[in-house]
Image: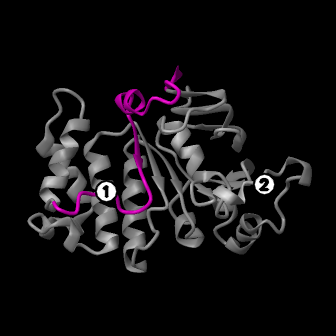
């Protein structure tokens, strides 16, 4: 089977500051993968490189066997990559319904908006009763649901989510993860960066851990569901299988990455 998403020897950063080092991975259709790591590990930069917001300095990214254009987010989006950024990126002065309608411009030509909106609202039912409300009146968690609903309307081939549970009430985290799982089960690839380890393990197929720019662990989620503390040890760096010579000192830009 041709991987839906493949990274081969990816290096990326900001100017002369290396952030992601020699990242390689393959994701098959319908697979949901979690990317864990401490602040500054390079997770967001990896997602931005895939989405085209950061141009890699080396390596190749392919979607369904075809290379993605490096550093060109509009062309990457045209290929079906969607990214939900951390921080509830919606238009606060517009209503929920207006925010959703904006997503029609990211749809494939000829697609039916009403059908896509109904699918998005079925995944995020908390939004159904709030279509007339301004996005600014929503809670942080509801704004995150709205941002994800916009991405769903855009018909992603592959969805990248950067810490969707950040600033979200704990009661909404399972709803977010269930929606991502449903998308994966429908054939969409999903790569989610998360800090909420234990709830995420219940929904994903595979886990990756980054440490200072390197992917230092890759494994099936089932191996850690009964012992999430062992995975947390790797994330915190106490048992990460990486030599000191391979580490990258990038803490100065940790909020960017």
Query: Where residue 66 sits: x, y (%)?
Result: 51, 20
* Separation of residues labelled 1 and 2 (CA atoms): 33 Å
Asked if the magenta segment contains residue 65, the reply would be: yes
Task: Report which residue position mark 2 lands on.
Answer: 249
* Mark sitting earlier along the chain (1/2): 1
Q: Residue at x 55, y 70 (%)?
A: 196
Task: Decide if residue 10 is on the left or right side of residue 126.
Answer: right
Q: Nearest the camera: 221 or 245?
A: 245
Other-residue count near label 2 (Cα within 10 Å), few / some / many at <14 / 14–19 / ≥20: some
> Judging from the image, what secondary structure is the residue with disc 1 in?
helix
Task: Decide if residue 215 is on the left or right side of residue 180.
Answer: right
Task: Decide if residue 139 is on the left or right side of residue 128.
Answer: right
Outermost residue on the top side: it is: 66
Q: Give yes or no for contact between labels 1 and 2 (Cβ–Cβ under 8 Å).
A: no
Q: Is residue 28 visible?
A: no
Q: Residue at x 51, y 45 (%)?
A: 31
Q: Is residue 88 visible?
A: yes
Q: Nearest the camera: 48 or 66?
A: 48
Task: Report which residue position mark 1 lands on.
Answer: 147
Corner quadrant of residue 24: top right
Q: Residue at x 15, y 67 (%)?
A: 134
Circle count: 2
Query: Where residue 4 sits: x, y (%)?
Result: 51, 32
Asked if the magenta segment contains residue 202, the reply would be: no
In the image, the segment drawn in magenta is: 64-93
Q: Residue at x 43, y 47 (%)?
A: 184
Query: Where residue 6 sits: x, y (%)?
Result: 59, 32
Question: Which image quarter holds the N terminus?
Answer: top right
Which label lies toward us, 1 or 2?
2
């Amino acid at each position: 089977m041709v991987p839906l998403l493949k990274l081969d020897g990816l290096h990326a950063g900001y100017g002369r500051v290396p952030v992601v080092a020699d990242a390689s991975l393959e994701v098959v259709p319908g697979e949901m993968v979690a990317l864990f790591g401490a602040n500054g590990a390079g997770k967001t930069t990896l997602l931005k490189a895939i989405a085209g917001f950061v141009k890699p300095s080396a390596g190749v990214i392919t979607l369904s066997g075809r290379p993605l254009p490096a550093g060109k987010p509009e062309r990457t989006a045209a290929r079906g990559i969607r990214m939900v950024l951390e921080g509830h990126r919606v238009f606060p002065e517009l209503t929920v319904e207006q925010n959703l309608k904006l997503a029609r411009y990211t749809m494939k030509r000829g697609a039916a908006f009403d059908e896509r909106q109904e699918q998005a609202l079925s995944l995020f039912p908390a939004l159904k009763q709030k279509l007339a409300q301004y996005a600014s009146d929503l809670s942080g968690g509801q704004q995150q649901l709205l941002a994800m609903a916009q991405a769903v309307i855009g018909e992603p081939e592959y969805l990248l989510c950067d810490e969707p549970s950040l600033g979200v009430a704990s009661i909404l985290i399972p709803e977010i993860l269930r929606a991502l799982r449903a998308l994966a089960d429908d054939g969409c690839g999903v790569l989610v960066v998360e800090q909420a380890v234990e709830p995420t393990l219940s929904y994903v197929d595979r886990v990756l851990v980054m440490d200072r720019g390197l992917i230092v662990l890759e494994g099936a989620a089932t191996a850690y569901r009964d012992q999430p503390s062992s995975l947390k040890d790797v994330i915190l760096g106490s048992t990460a299988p990486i030599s000191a010579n391979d580490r990258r000192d990038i803490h100065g830009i940790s909020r960017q990455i």
